[in-house]
Amino acid sequence: KQKEVEFIAKEIKELILRENVKPSDICVAFNLADRYSSIISTNFAAYDIPFNLTDRKLLSSCLPVIALSNFLEMKNIDYYFKIINRALSTGFITIKNFDLFNLMRVANELNIVSGYENWSSKLKNYDEQKRKQYSRVNQYSVNKAFLDIKKLNSLFKVFENDLSIVEFKKSLIDLISKLNLTENILSDKNVDIEENVRGLEKFISASTELFDLLKGTTQKEKNPSSYYFSILKTLIKKERFNIKEKINSGVQVTNLSELRGFNYDYLFIGGLIDGEFPTKFNPEIFFTDTFLKKDDEHISEQLFHFHNSISSVRKTLYLS
């Protein structure tokens, strides 16, 4: 991979210097661009080639999606205090009049680790007379923590009963709205807003599509929320999303599947080796038989991407 990318970088440098080709007229595409992204970044920088890498990122690397995943996990593992802290300390999830710092401090002082009933019992039965044992809490802070843990639990109220796929989808979207995820992403000036917006957008669209596919295939019309949460957990680990390419900002480096609708004077297609293009067929073991992609369909899809990509070349095609 290192030698291959170095060859491509040298050839691009020749085009730019000797033939006066604009970097934006050149595209480098791989079937699995994420395997080459770090090598591309190092070599293109060494050759002083401006480039725009539209790397496909895992949903599990998107901070707002991580926060949401931790929040959903909170119910599954019965309000473990570390998960509460992980979900709410990022700033991407906010709950009106919720004091996370106070809740964590009270939990530490009263030795509360997990269990909603345990939280409720210890906070409700706190005795003001015992205050001397707990130097950093008082009746007000304990009462506030009690109200906040109840507030958290109320957000999961709808998930306590078995739900149909339609009901769960609606409840999930409502929860995302109540947690102010979108507003907090857009108001955060210290991070890449576009990346976080696209990550959350991909989570919503991919989960909606998946649940639509599963509709009617489950054995029961309604299932416990834990069933849907486990599906979402798998989705977040597997699914990827793209950052929108910046047009005319340098050599475009992307996945073959992203070339649809674009044309370039010079196209480099790399990674032409069995196992990478075409990739080895791996059926999704957690899908039902109805949605399992067959081996021949996989090859047809790979073939389509190849034909689609070479049709986007106006002048010269490089294969490596």
Image: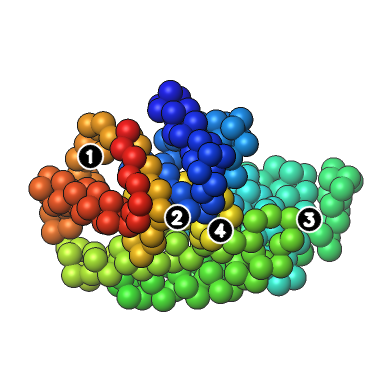
Which residue appears at 31% of the width and 37% of the height? 319
Q: Which one is earlier in the sequence, the residue at label 4 or at label 2?
A: 2
Q: Is residue 264 visible?
A: yes
Q: Which mark is residue 246?
A: none
Q: Nearer the viewer, residue 151 or 199?
A: 199
Check disc 3: other Cα within 10 Å, few if <14, some if 14-19, many if 20+: some
Mark toward the viewer: 3 or 2: 2
Q: On the picture, is 252 further left or further right than 147?
A: left
How far apart marks 4 and 2 lie (CA) works out to 21 Å
Residue pictured at 35% horizontal, 37% vertical: 270
Q: Nearer the viewer, mark 3 or mark 1?
A: 1
Q: Vertically, is 298 above or below 262?
A: above
Residue beneath the point at 58% across and 55% down: 249
- Contact between labelled residues 2 and 4, with CB atoms less than 8 Å apart: no
Question: Residue lying farthest left?
Answer: 296
In this orientation, which residue lies closer to the viewer: 241 or 216? 241
Quickly name the residue at label 1: 278
Q: CA distance from mark 3 to mark 1?
A: 54 Å
Task: Residue 241: give its label.
Answer: 2
Q: Nearer the viewer's eye, disc 4 or disc 3?
A: 4
Badge 4 density bin: few <14, some 14–19, many ≥20, Cα 10 Å: some
* Circle 3 residue: 102
- Residue sitting at x 59%, y 48%: 83
Front one among 243 and 191: 243
Q: Which quadrant: the N terminus?
A: top left
Query: Tag 3's secondary structure?
Result: helix
Callout 1, which amino acid? Pro
Distance CA(mark 4)–CA(mark 1): 30 Å
> Could you classify mark 2 by the number of other residues whose Cα lies within 10 Å: few (under 14), some (14-19), or many (20 or more)?
many
Q: Residues within 10 Å of mark 1 (few under 14, many from 20)?
A: many
The first of marks 3 and 2 along the sequence is 3
Going by the numbered disc 2, the residue's amino acid type is: Phe
